[in-house]
């Protein structure tokens, strides 16, 4: 039986024991089941299933942080006099191999305020991205790799 199925069974058992099958209580059971399954592993450290969930949470946290900080920067840009933004268009060579990976990468980029995916090259290896707040090309590429692309690919692969 897969780890996800075990986790769902544990969540249902939690709901049955609590005599409460509400969505909130089942979510608590799911999280508790995830914690239990993280410790049940033949190898030391968290199980691959738990590691995948931790990677998902890390990606969501990085995305939330990026959205909050860029929203703040955009609000300051609008509210204060003078132009502090440094808009530019960059060619970003991606490590994504499948159409799904490229699509999700562009969705994350487009949902982040101040950035916009403009185009994908014919071979799907280069993304053209407009960004409002970047100091250098190297800083932009490093930020994209470390905070967007690698966490996303870790979740998908």
Image: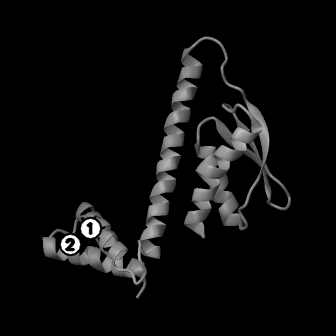
Residue that lies at the very extreme toward the right in this rendered image: 122
Residue at screen point 59% across, 42% down: 112
Residue that lies at the very extreme toward the front in this rendered image: 44
Residue at screen point 63% across, 35% down: 114
Whether residue 5 is visible to the viewer of this picture, yes or no, is: yes
Are there few (<14), some (14-19), or many (20+) residues within 10 Å of tag 1?
many
Q: For this view, does 41 lie left or right of residue 68?
A: left
Whether residue 107 is visible to the viewer of this picture, yes or no, is: no
Q: 58 or 24: nearer the eye?
A: 58
Picture disc at residue 15:
2
Q: Secondary structure at mark 1?
A: helix
Quadrant of the rendered image containing residue 85:
top right
Indicate the position of residue 76 as horizontal and vertical percent values: 54, 21
Indicate the position of residue 147 as horizontal and vertical percent values: 59, 49
Q: For this view, does 89 lie left or right of residue 132?
A: right
Residue at screen point 83% across, 55% down: 121
Quadrant of the rendered image containing residue 101:
bottom right
């Amino acid at each position: 039986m897969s780890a996800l199925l075990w986790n769902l069974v544990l969540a249902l058992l939690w709901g049955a024991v609590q005599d409460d099958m509400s969505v909130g209580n089942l979510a608590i059971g799911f999280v508790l089941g995830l914690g239990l399954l993280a410790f049940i592993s033949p190898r030391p450290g968290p199980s691959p299933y738990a590691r995948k969930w931790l990677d998902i949470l890390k990606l969501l946290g990085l995305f939330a942080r990026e959205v909050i900080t860029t929203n703040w920067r955009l609000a300051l840009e609008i509210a204060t006099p003078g132009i502090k933004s440094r808009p530019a268009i960059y060619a970003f060579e991606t490590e994504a191999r499948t159409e799904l990976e490229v699509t999700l990468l562009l969705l994350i980029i487009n949902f982040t305020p101040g950035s916009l995916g403009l185009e994908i090259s014919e071979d799907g290896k280069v993304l053209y991205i407009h960004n409002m707040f970047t100091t250098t090309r190297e800083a932009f590429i490093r930020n994209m790799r470390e905070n967007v692309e690698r966490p996303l690919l870790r979740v998908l692969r």
